[in-house]
Structure formats: C-alpha cells, structure tokens
Image (cartoon, rainbow, N blue to C red):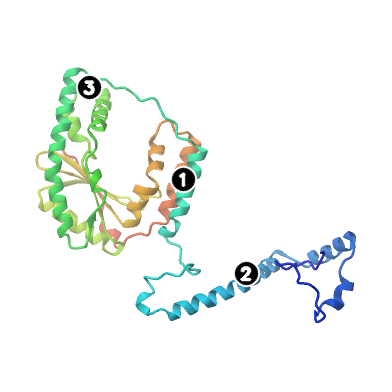
Amino acid sequence: MVGSIDRPVQPDPPDRPDRSDRSDRSERPKTPQDFDAKLAERLSTLNRASAYERLYARAQAQDAPFRERLAREESAQPKDSLSAGKPERDLERPRTYWTEVPRFLAMWRDHAQKWPLIQGEKVDRPMESGRRAEADDAVRRLSQSEPGISEKLRDVAANNSNDGWLVGYEFRLKGHNRLMEKIAERLEGESNRKPSDIARGITDAIRYTFCFKREDYSEGYLDVKQRLEDCGYKMYLCKNLWGNREYRGVNTRWITADGQRFEVQFHTPESFHAKHEVTHRAYERARSPLTSRNELAATEKFQREVSSWIPEPVGLVKIKDHKEEVG
C-alpha cells in the first residue's frame, strides 16, 4: 500500500474505527504521478544532516528497551560478580588492540585472497663434503650451548623484580636444517670464512622473549639487562623500535664469554601477540623477493595499522639504543 514517505518497518495493522489517520486518507497520493510529486516536495526540504538525525533518533528509540534491560541486569548483579558475568552485549565497550584483533585477522585473510602465496623454487646451495661436515659440527655445538644459556634465562625470568615472563620459549633454538641453510647462504658471499665462525655469528640461532605489562616494561627491561650482565653476558646491540611504524618492541643481542651470540626481545602482551599471531606472515611476505611492489605496499600498510593500536609502555625514554663491535 502506498503510504507516507516514512513507512514503518512493520506493515500497518488492519484499519480500526479509532485510528486517528482515517480522516487523512484523502490526502495520500493516489497515482504514481502524485507520489512522485509528493516525494520531490519532501526531498526538497530534506538534507543529509536531518536525514542522519532522523535515523539516529530512530535507532536510539529501537535500542532504548535493550539499554533499560541491560541497566537493570547490571544493577541487580553483586559488585564483585560484574567482571565474571559479562552482559551479552556491551554497547559502551572501548576500542583497544584486543577488540580490533578479529578485524586484523579478517584484513589479512582478504590480503591473502587478493595476493595468493607464491611458492618459489627452493634454492639448493651445495657445500663440499668437508665444509658440510664442518657446518654440521658447528650447528651441533651451537645446540649444545643453548641449554646452559636457557637455564640462566629461566632463572632470570623466575627472579626478576617486575613480574616479567618468557614467551615463545619453545622457539628458542632455530632448527638444524634452517641453520645449515643459513650457513650455506653466507658461505656463497664469504667463501673464505669457516662454517663454525658463521654459525657463531647467526644472532638469532638462540633467541628468547621477555614479556612485561606496560606499566612494568621499562623497569623490567633494565632489571633483566642487569641480571644478564651479572651472568657474565655482554649486550652489544639494543634497538628500541617502539617508534617504528610497522613493528613495536625492543630487540637486543648478547654474547657469552666463550663467544656464543644470542638474542633477547622485550614485548608487552599486545606487541608480542601482534608479532607472533597477526603480522608474522606479513613480515615474511615483505622479506620475500617474490613479493610484488603493490603487495609490499599493502603488506606494510597492514603492519602499520596493527602497530598503531599497540599501546606504548611507560618510561620508554629509559631504554637507549646501543651498538658496539664484538669479535
């Protein structure tokens, strides 16, 4: 039935004798031409602002019963149970990194569909038998160095003064095959070097990550740094990357008294989750020579969007960049 311009969502109920608009039926448009004329008259006085206000008022009116019920349920709950029993819908929930994670994952899914992963042909980097045996032995010795370092890192985690904890501990040692690939890759450009020297120089062959709450982060970093130095380890590189648009965190590199290098990263729960669960594949795509220029730009934009939602820790000015040469 042709009615007024603002039709109700539900159809009109059957006519009743007491309907107030029965007398107005003669004013309703009866032909398509009349309807068009009436519509043009209404649109001539309707602007975007008034249309928005009307829609907003209608939405508020529709939501009012729910808001009243939600307020009654919250007021009826004991104060100590509010955190345990969450309402089915939180209309005033603030947007944080965690609320945006589903959106980030959907963004990456769309990215992967637009740019399917290109599997490049694996490059076989042969090594002569003598060098391969030497590289294999170097990787085994490196693996033997890890347990002693890990024991000290676990002790630091258990006794640090700012409630820091180790995350991703199961990934602390890079795999044997991947280390052999890296040695072979570097031997191509540094053929005069020994595989054992190259193995020792792989900074992330052994790696750890400390996590701190934002309010404890900077003091936690300083405390862990001092404890590692007390273990006899020397920090030769620190990069405070909290000002970076695509990655947030602090990366440090260390060396033991006998020359074994290892890496320690410092994260908040948000920055570690972003790196480990959200942007890791984007980072790998950005490093791949098979990634097109257009995809690279989209990948970097994605990482910037994720990083922009990671809240900064307190006291970052205390974490200074540092670099020195080691043998």
Q: Give the left or right position of residue 49, taking residue 20 as reference.
A: left
Which class describes the residues within 10 Å of circle 2: few (<14), some (14-19), or many (20+)? few
Query: Counting residues from the N terminus, which is met first, the one under dot 1 or under dot 3?
Result: 1
- State the residue in front, 117 or 3: 3
Secondary element at tag 3: loop
Which one is in front, 263 or 106? 106
Quadrant in which the N terminus appears: bottom right
Q: Which residue is mark 1?
A: 108
Disc 2 designates what residue?
59
Q: Residues within 10 Å of mark 3 (few under 14, many from 20)?
A: few
Q: Which residue is mark 3?
A: 191
Relative to 322, is 78 on the left or the right?
right
Task: Describe the element under mark 2 as helix, strand or loop.
Answer: helix
The residue shown at (71%, 67%) is: 10
Give the alpha-carbon distance from disc 2 to disc 1, as whole Å: 32 Å
Question: Alpha carbon of mark 1 to alpha carbon of mark 3: how far?
Answer: 40 Å
Foreground label between 2 and 3: 2
